[in-house]
Amino acid sequence: MVFLFVACASQDGKSGDDASVPTSDSPTDSVRDTTGSDSDSDTTEPTPTELPDTVLVITQDAFNRRFYGWRADGVRTTWGWDTTPYTDSLWAEGVSVPEVVMARPLTAVSLGTLLTGSWPRNHHVRQSADQFLATPTLPKLYAEAGYTTAAIFSNRCGYTSPDVVPGWDRAVCNYEEGVQGVSQQTVEDEDVAYLQTILDEYPGERLFVWVHLINPHDELEAVEPWFTSFHPEAYKGDLDPMNRSDLDRVSTQGRAYTEEDRRFVEATYASAVRANDARIQAMVDAVEAAGRGERLLLVLGADHGEELLERPEPPYFWHPCTYYQGAGLTSWLFRGVGLRPGTVEGFVSAVDVAPTLLELSGLDPSGLMTDGGSLRSAFASGAAPDRPAFFERGDETAGVADGTLRYMLNPKSSFTCLTYDSKNPYTTPDEELYDLSVDPFELDNLVESEPALADAMRGTLCAHILDGTWSGNDSSNALVAACSEDPGSP
């Protein structure tokens, strides 16, 4: 069974409680050798007993990286909240990839890339309404290799359909946006129960299971007992995190956002994170109790992050309208057979996740029409692949991450985005360049002060955009026109 939360647990049921929890920005200080031998061992073919019989991938929706307890820049440092005690222990035991660049901070687009290993231009999902993956998918390749495949989603229900994502043997979606009176907490408890059903029904089969949890996605629901433990004092403001349009008052209507507001909203968000931490423990415990701990590959990640007003201009909550780091970067963990604790430093692309899963499972990644590559050698070296990671915000604004730099090109300047109460323009500069090594919240635009760097990054992005068909309307596309006029430095 494969879940987009990949973690390996030992068969004796140990879940990492004795592991030290890292306190730096990287979950561990040492680089993990994936096999325990020399530096070239990442090319050695694993034996059958070194391959997973269960792949569990767990993705969380709209997970802001600051809410992992192991991050030095996270809420444990800011507010003193212990949001992820169980998953922190897993991060101390696996290969961590702290800076994964997602294709777009939109679930449909991001899951399309994770399921296929390809850019949106190639899997053809650019917006939430798009649901056709025109390339081979992970579940299809696992099914062809003899795995029983299962999707347990609490968002983007269309992706549990074999007509949309070929290869699922079993699939369930417990929640879809717009259903009134259904708590996101309830549907996620049902996800845990459904995993137990799969484990009971397929005791002797190899399993690939992907669990996609909707939390901590908006609407932000205060989950007890954790909310009260994070925010015991009474809130005197008037913001309601359960009301999307109410928070839009801050984004689009000029309402001031006080420190009291921030603590209250972030405590609400953190309580959903803590609830998921308990669910992840329950799922891993269930897999181990089923006798699948020894050869379990566990992968933990997110489809995208979440903006929680980390940048004062332009002010913004949520994720669909933005491509800044709070929503565009995620952290991933790979824990399992043959993997030792370590950290991959630098930007990694979301297109690398699918081929990495296949190679760690002893399967051929070439079966995917992938735009990425396996990270297995990066797990051994500790260095991210020397290739840029691209991202977009639809087909008319895009960016690239390379080294410690992130560059965005937005030729229309104003991006019309759906907020929850109306369509409003979300204005960002034509060009942006940030160095996250010194500016982690992307507040200092370097385009004017570092024109040569900006031109080089534009060259990398424009070469990507002009390489083949960018979209179905290239003749009128603003990005294509901008790059054709000024392609930057090669």
Image (spheres, helix red, strand yellow):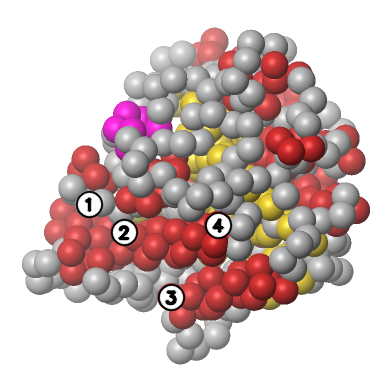
Which residue is drawn at the image coordinates 64% and 11% (left, top)? 38
Q: Which quadrant of the figure contains the N terminus?
A: bottom right
The CA distance from mark 1 to mark 3 is 20 Å
Which residue is under mark 1? 81
Q: Using the rendered view, name the quadrant where residue 240 is placed.
A: bottom left
Question: Which numbered dot is residue 185?
Answer: 3
Disc 2 or 1, which lies upstream in sequence? Answer: 1
- Mark 2 or mark 4, whichever is nearer to me: 4
For the image, the number of numbered tags is 4
Secondary element under disc 2, as helix, strand or loop, is: helix
Disc 2 or 3, which lies upstream in sequence? Answer: 3
Question: Which numbered dot is residue 270?
Answer: 2
Question: Which numbered dot is residue 322?
Answer: none
Q: Using the rendered view, name the quadrant where residue 179 is placed.
A: bottom right
Query: Residue 287's x, y, as percent?
Result: 58, 60
Q: Tag 1: residue type?
A: Trp
- Mark 3 or mark 4, whichever is nearer to me: 4
Which residue is under mark 4? 288
Indicate whether 225 appears above or below 346: below
